[in-house]
Image (spheres, grey):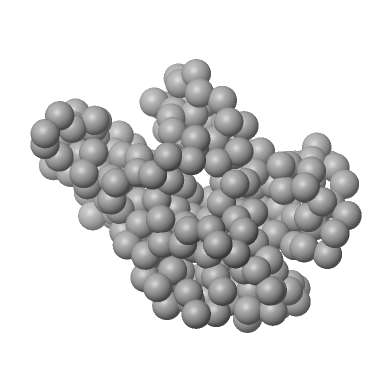
Amino acid sequence: MNERTALVTGANKGIGKHIARLLAAEGLTVYVGSRDPGRGQRAVEEIGAGARLLVLDVTDPDGVAQAAAQVDRLDVLVNNAGISPSLAPPTDTGVEEYRRTYETNVFGVVAVTNAFLPALRRSPRPRIVNISSGTASLTWSTTPNPQFTPASGAAAYRSSKAALNALTVLYAQTLAEDGFKVNALAPGLRATDLNPRAAAAGGDPAEAAQGALRLAMLPDDGPTGGFFSWDGTPVPW
């Protein structure tokens, strides 16, 4: 074990749990952020040495504050918690779905990041990794030859991740002089319960987690304010 610590939100399952496992394997003490204490504890037991439960609902301001008060120093923050309520296009997506999605995917990231900034500032090498989506790339969603078309749907999810990308750039620029490295990861389509499309996918979540680990462990001369695929290649904004 070393003295480095990490927090992964939404780490009781899916990509988040794999990220927590990899960080723990690197010798970090890893706070497994989970809304549900029971599921979080089971994840901690499965991850093993180095894992610690931190009850954390990113949409609950009081809960976020209480969680932050339990962590004195933090070296790595992985904003992984995210939801995708439906695959509906914008014309079939109600305002409430946008509100609910942004509450977790955007506002929750801001709440957690700002609450844990004092702990991150105590680290000599603070790293923030925001789990985004390739479907949030405006370049990949527009001509010529878009990878993602309107038929891909998921308007609330995709737009929320585009907003998260903008925040990634702004945090990176704001915190650069303090030694922070802030980057976004496009994990690829993985077999998780994010939405029906993901559930039916064959992509290995552990493979995506390797990309997050790479950004979490960046050296001092590593990039900041970037958007990267799980394999390390840059993704256009």
**What residue appears at the point 60 percent right and 64 percent down from the top-left corner?**
220
Q: Please, is residue 208 above or below residue 5 in the view? A: above
| Residue 83 appearing in the image | no
Q: Is residue 140 visible?
A: yes
Q: Is residue 46 left or right of residue 160?
A: right
How many marks the image carries: the answer is 0
Rendered residue at 55%/70% (across/down): 180
The part of the image, by quadrant, that contains residue 86 is top left
* Nearer to me, 145 or 89: 145
Residue 63 to residue 177: above or below: above
> Residue at coordinates 28% horizontally, 50% vertically from top-left?
237
- Name the side, left or right, on which 218 lies relative to 102: right
Which quadrant of the rendered structure holds the N terminus?
Answer: bottom right
Residue 208 lies, in percent from the top left, at 54, 35
Rendering quarter of residue 216: bottom right
In the rendered image, the residue lying farthest to the front is: 221
Most foreground residue, 79 or 124: 124
Image coordinates of residue 26 in percent, x first then y, are 77, 47
Q: Position of residue 165 (x, y in %)?
A: 35, 57
Left or right: residue 76 versus residue 154 is right
Residue at 20% across, 39% down:
141
Tell me residue 172's x, y (percent).
44, 69
